[in-house]
Image (tube, grey):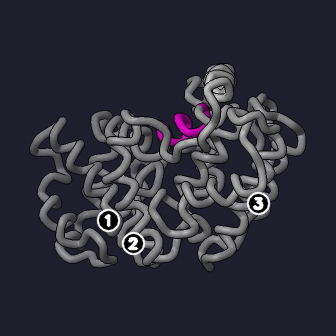
């Protein structure tokens, strides 16, 4: 089950998630989530070459590793595909949290998911809840959802069309933007994963602990490879900024998903997330051989 460690405080989450959902459609087409700093023409050409050389977390094998890493922190498991059916109110002010990436009834991304599923498969078991999901958006209310919504969510999760909708929304809102920005910054697979995990937890709104502002904080003390900087030094700066952001919120104060996972890989200079991988989250040990 998803742990409270990965759940932002209500006010910040409601802002970050909704802002991201409205912004992301244009960002994926128009460019990176946050533009890199202005460079000369020569530096720009070099940056493009560096970004092109950066490996991709979107390689299927690397993406599978990313899903397992996030699941270890969010669900204390590596079996991320077992969580299409997951749904629970974890008392974080976001209403129901559900699915493989923690779609929430109070933050808009669950509503977008069910709307997508219904466009693809009208009359599905969750379609009747769309009016209620629109009403509770921005709140922690279950009004119009109880008592049968969790049961019907689990029923829908057996449908491959709903599983695919979850995959697609995860990619559109969280995974693809993280990879796109990582490649623009010239960082490799590990760095792109660090970006992805940050967007999953913090969203990308305007508050100080959102992904874009974590990145801005890192840029004040280090330069990304696309601008001629050292990748390891930049990623340490990003993780330092991430830890700072996590410690601003009680629900995030356990920083082991950075300290005993991402930082471990970075200290080993495993910038491509090559296996075997060994890490700990919240004291539990995991391995991908």
In magenta stretch: residue 179: yes
Asked if marks 3 and 2 touch (Cβ < 8 Å), the reply is: no
Q: Mark 3, residues whose alpha carbon is within 10 Å: few (<14), some, or many (≥20)?
A: some
Query: Disc 1 on helix, strand or loop?
Result: loop
Query: Disc 3 on helix, strand or loop?
Result: helix
How far apart are labels 1 and 3 at the CA level? 31 Å
Where is residue 41, by image quadrant?
top right
Say which label, 1 or 3, has the lower sequence index: 1
Dominant secondary structure of the residues highlighted in magenta in the image: helix
Asked if marks 2 and 1 touch (Cβ < 8 Å), the reply is: yes
Image coords of residue 4 (percent x, y): 57, 71
**The C terminus appears in which quarter of the rendering?**
top right
Q: Which residue is mark 3?
A: 240
Q: Which residue is mark 1?
A: 105
| Bounds of the magenta segment | 175-183
In magenta stretch: residue 40: no
Q: Which residue is mark 2?
A: 94
Q: Mark 2, residues whose alpha carbon is within 10 Å: few (<14), some, or many (≥20)?
A: many
On the picture, is 277 further left or further right than 158?
Answer: right
Say which label, 3 or 2, has the lower sequence index: 2
Q: Which residue: 26% across, 57% down? A: 111
Q: Which residue: 30% across, 72% down? A: 138
């Amino acid at each position: 089950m998803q742990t409270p460690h990965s759940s932002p405080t209500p006010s910040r989450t409601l802002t970050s998630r909704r802002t991201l959902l409205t912004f992301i459609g244009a960002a994926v087409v128009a460019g990176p989530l946050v533009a890199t700093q202005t460079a000369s023409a020569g530096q720009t050409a070099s940056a493009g070459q560096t970004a092109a050389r950066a490996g991709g977390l979107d390689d299927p094998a690397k993406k599978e590793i990313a899903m397992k890493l996030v699941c270890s922190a969010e669900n204390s498991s590596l079996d991320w595909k077992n969580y299409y059916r997951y749904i629970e109110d974890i008392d974080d002010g976001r209403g129901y949290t559900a699915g493989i990436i923690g779609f929430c009834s109070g933050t808009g991304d669950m509503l977008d998911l069910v709307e997508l599923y219904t466009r693809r498969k009208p009359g599905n078991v969750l379609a009747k809840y769309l009016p209620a999901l629109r009403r509770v958006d921005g709140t922690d209310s279950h009004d119009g959802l109880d008592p049968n919504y969790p049961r019907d969510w689990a029923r829908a999760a057996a449908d491959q069309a709903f599983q695919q909708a979850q995959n697609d929304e995860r990619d559109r809102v969280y995974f693809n933007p993280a990879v796109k920005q990582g490649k623009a910054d010239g960082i490799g697979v590990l760095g792109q994963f660090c970006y992805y995990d940050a967007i999953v937890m913090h969203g990308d709104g305007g508050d100080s602990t959102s992904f874009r502002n974590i990145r801005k904080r890192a840029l004040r003390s280090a330069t990304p490879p696309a601008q001629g900087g050292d990748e390891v030094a930049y990623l340490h700066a990003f993780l330092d900024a991430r830890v700072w952001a996590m410690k601003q919120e009680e629900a995030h104060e356990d920083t082991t998903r950075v300290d005993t996972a991402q930082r471990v890989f970075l200290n080993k200079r495993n910038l491509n997330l090559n296996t075997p991988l060994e890490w700990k989250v919240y004291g539990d040990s995991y391995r991908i051989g």
